[in-house]
Amino acid sequence: MRALKIMPRPAAVACVLALVAACTPAETASVRRPGTTTAPSSPSARPKATRHGPPGEQPRTGEVRPVERSGGLPPVISSIPTRRKVVFLTIDDGWEQDPGFVEQVRDERIPITAFAMRDAVEAKGTPDPAGGPGKYVGAGKWGYFRQLRGAGVAVENHTLTHPNLRLLSQDAQRREICGSSQVIRKELGTRPTLFRPPFGNYNTGTLRAAKNCGIDAVLLWTATVQPGGKIAYQVPDKRLRPGDILLLHFRPNLARDFRILVNKIKRRGFELGNLQAYLAAMAVDR
C-alpha cells in the first residue's frame, strides 16, 4: 500500500473540503439536478429495499426427497414432501383479470403459479358464478397473463376447454393438453411443463397424453381457497400442513381475497414457497 503524504495544514484542509464536496452528491438519498429543488426525504418517500432473485422461499439442501416416477409417466403431485412450514400458492383458469392482483404479486414478490385455461382467458363462455358477478372478466385476455409472467408468475397448462378428462379418449385428452400448450407458447413464448387436470380428474390416458405434450408433472392440491379468502381443507383437523399446495381461482374480488389469504397464512407461521424451485429439488425436470 502506498504511504500517504503529510501535507501542510492549509493544503490538507483544502483537500478535505474538496473531497467532501465531491462525495456529497453520491452519498445523499437523492441527487439534485440543475433547475430542480430537492424536498426533504421522509420514511414513506424512501424507496423500498429490493430483494433480488426468484420470489418465495427456496428449498434447503436435503429438505425434500426425490419424486418417484412410474413407467416413465409424469408424477402426480398433490403436496411437497417437506417438514418446513412452507406452503405453495396456485391459481386456475383466468376468468377474472383483476389488475390489483398483478400489483400485489409484483410489488410484494409473492410466489404463485397460474394454470391457464384458454376459454377462460379469452372469455369464451360463462365463468363459474360461485364468487358472484365479475368485474374484469376477460379484461386483458392474454395480455393480462403477459403482465403476470412479467411479475414472476409461471404460467402452466389447464386445458383448452376445461372438460372432465376421464370421459375423453386419450387422443381427445392429448388435443386438449397439447392444444393448450401450443396456445400458451404462441401467446407467451414459453412452453408449459406442468399440468393441472380440470376438477382434479385424470386417468392413465391423461398421464400418457401429458407426457406426449411435454408435461413433466401433474399438479393437484391439498386445500382450496373460497370467496373471502377462506381455506377449505381436505384434512380432518382443518389446518395448514407443511408442503400444502393451495388452489385459488380467478374469481371476483380476487385482489381483496388474495390479500386476506396471504395475511392469514403468515399469521399462522407459514412462509410462501417457490414451487418451481421445490420441484427442481425433487428432481422433477423443468
Image: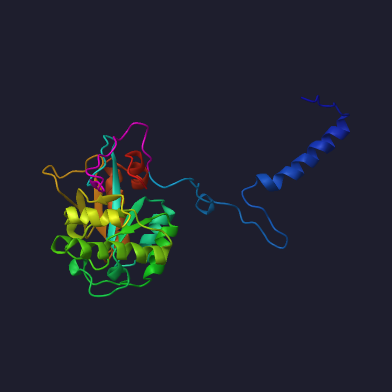
Tell me what residue is drawn at x 10 percent, y 44 percent: 236
Look at the image and say whether residue 279 sits in the magenta stretch: no
Residue at the far bottom in the pictured view: 125
11 left or right of 22 in image:
right
Q: Nearer the viewer, residue 173 or 275?
A: 173
In percent of width and height, residue 46 lies at 54, 51
Rendered view: 265 above or below 154: above
| Residue 230 at least partly seen | no
225 left or right of 6 in image:
left
> To which quarter of the image does residue 58 belong?
top left
254 left or right of 144 in image:
left
Magenta region, main secondary structure: loop
Look at the image and say whether residue 62 sits in the magenta stretch: yes
Rendered view: 20 above or below 185: above
If the image is split into quadrants, where does the N terminus sit?
A: top right
In percent of width and height, residue 143 lies at 41, 68
Q: Nearer the viewer, residue 167 or 205?
A: 205
- The magenta region covers 57-76
Tell me what residue is drawn at x 25 percent, y 38 percent: 81
